[in-house]
Amino acid sequence: MTTTLTTSPLAPLLDRLFAQADAATSPALAGISREERERLMHSRTEYLDFYGRLKDLWLPVSRETGTLLYLLARGTGARNIVEFGTSFGISTLHLAAALRDNGGGRLIGSEFEPSKVARAREHLAEGGFADLVEIREGDALTTLAADLPDTIDLLLLDGAKALYGDILSLMESRLRPGALIVADNADDSPDYLARVRSPAGGYLSVPFSRDVELSMRLG
């Protein structure tokens, strides 16, 4: 079994991007108090403004979560993946690598910040995955509301935390039995956690490392 994750061109590209992410700063974020930041993060009406202020921050998954995404997508033979919150494309690269190693497929991502969309597309082209990925620019409540695969194998939630439940609702009828949902920073979305952890919710769910919730659609 071969893997594109640990070989060139992807491995050195990811090393460079993670280093850039670690070095990134946001003057706008420094000017927001902790209390105001917490309020905005959980707002269902001001999320576009809040994350627009953070356009210089990469907000990527961790290296461990990136590897987990690859393992889950590769191990389940995923062919159709949806990503909420592409940012600069680090998580996208991990998922696209799994699609490539699975023999192909389609990854649909959503990112509302135009500058991040442009950079993510550059990174995907550099890694050799542009043919597998479509990044839709705009509010995910609109961009992910139509023209999706009939069945979705894996869903990544890594955008505005207040919308995790709404995005899951958009995808739910298309999630095949056994489909996996990975929610990064899930502790910031308590309503979402209550939903996927409820015995009556139709999911089997478990907290994972670094604030990641891993769930499986039961049917």
Image (cartoon, rainbow, N blue to C red):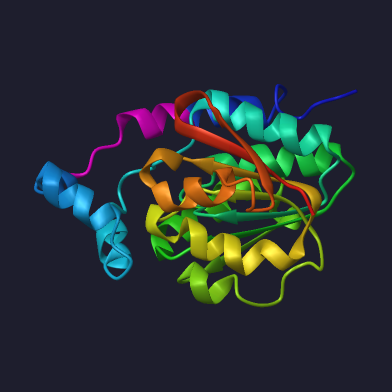
Task: Answer with left or right where residue 79 lies relative to residue 124.
Answer: right
x and y, in percent, of residue 205 in the image:
62, 38
Q: Main secondary structure of the magenta part?
A: helix
- Residue drawn at (49%, 47%), measured in percent from left and top? 194
Instruction: Tell me the quarter of the image containing the N terminus.
Output: top right
Instruction: Tell me the quarter of the image containing the C terminus.
Output: bottom right
- Residue drawn at (64%, 52%), measured in percent from left and top? 200
Residue 14 to residue 138: above or below: above
Residue 20 to residue 50: above or below: above
- Residue drawn at (76%, 30%), measured in percent from left and top? 4
Task: Answer with left or right where residue 7 lies relative to residue 55.
Answer: right
140 vs 175, nearest the viewer: 175
x and y, in percent, of residue 177 in the image:
82, 52
What span is colored magenta in the figure? Answer: 17-26
Residue 187 to residue 192: above or below: above
- Assess whether residue 29 is covered by the magenta stretch: no
- Assess whether residue 20 is covered by the magenta stretch: yes
Q: Is residue 4 visible?
A: yes
